[in-house]
Amino acid sequence: MTDRARIVFWRLVILVLLLGSWEGLTRIKAVSKTPGLYWLDPFFISRPSAIVERFVYLASDKVRLSIWQMALSTVQSTLWGFVVGVSTGFVVGLVLGRNDRLARIFEPYIVAFNSLPRIALVPLITMIFGFGIAAKIVLAWTIVFFIVFFNTFQGARSVDPDLIHAARFLGASERQIMRTVVVPSALAWTFASLTPSISFALIGVVVGEFLGGESGGGLGFLIIQSLGTLNAADMMVALIALGVIGIVMALGIRQVETRLLRWPTASRSGALRESATRRSSSCSCWASPACGSRGRSGCRAPARRRSCRSRRSGSPRGPSGRSRARSRCTPAGCRATSRRSSRRSRSAAA
């Protein structure tokens, strides 16, 4: 059994034990009458069998607004708020992260707005945008924006300065530096905030549906409706549905992150392969009087200028058992920088 299979097995075992204990404890009346365990009464938390029955009923055509329509409305609002929040947070974080003056100008306003409790903004957002989908999207945006903004801002600030200097030395413009250096570095920080962002977007949408009523038509409306009728089974159906939606969205974000962030590993492996290739194909030859543009090892002089550096430490020995200095080829040919090798070469030529 693989490690992944073991993890899935233990997850199923925990789920079965949880549901079995829930069902069994709620059927024993003596348990709910125990001091401190009153909440185990089916009136408060229902039981799994009753929840399944209510789910089947809410998913049928017997109700005017099915559970599928409510879930679709919640998911749609969550995704819209998530996309708008991530896109705006990423752009603003990237701009302020690379412009220190703008960051210092807008810092007090950003901190002040982020300090406001989101639940306190619900009445104001409802007054402006009504009870429809727009209010839920705006409420989700107010949560997601700041999560993504602060991560992207920190990612743009933590770019290695040596990479930027190297790009400028190679002639890259500011737009190319932003596209090839800053954005890839900030993306890693941004993706780290996507999983909690999708969860908080879902929370914001549900809070908006609490006040939106039936016009919102989401799972939040089902929770408020079941609270008004004291129906714990319907409330549990909505809560379990929200949990499943959150798990699916988080797994989807992780899959997207895995696919889009393959470039760090690929770039590191590519750099290692390129470095190894350069080492193996570096032009070097044995110092000898006959070494011109080609040496005895058959190396070719590179097209660009390269300084000829001698490697005297640990230099190998030639067929005659004498130590020969190894040097790199230059456009002018192979030049021995070791004095000892030069003397031996001149004596051999004489």
Image (cartoon, rainbow, N blue to C red):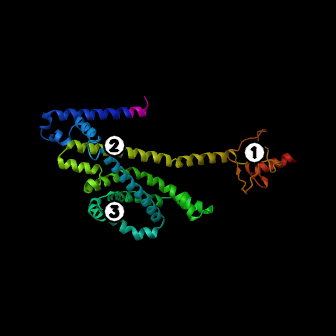
Q: Which of marks 2 and 1 is in front?
A: 2
Identify which residue is drawn at 76% across, 51% down. 301
Query: Magenta segment: does it hold 51?
Result: no
Please provide percent x and percent y for residue 231: 19, 44
- Disc 3 residue type (three-letter): Asn
Q: Where are the magenta residues, as a range?
A: 1-7
Residue linked to disc 1: 324
Give me the C-alpha separation between circle 3 and circle 1: 69 Å
- Residue 131 lies left or right of residue 173; in this view the side is left
Quadrant of residue 241 within the rendered picture: top left
Confirm whether residue 45 shows in the render. Answer: yes
- Residue 6 lies left or right of residue 179; in this view the side is left
Residue linked to disc 3: 114
Q: What element carries label 3?
A: helix
Residue linked to disc 2: 244
Q: Is mark 1 on a helix, strand or loop?
A: loop
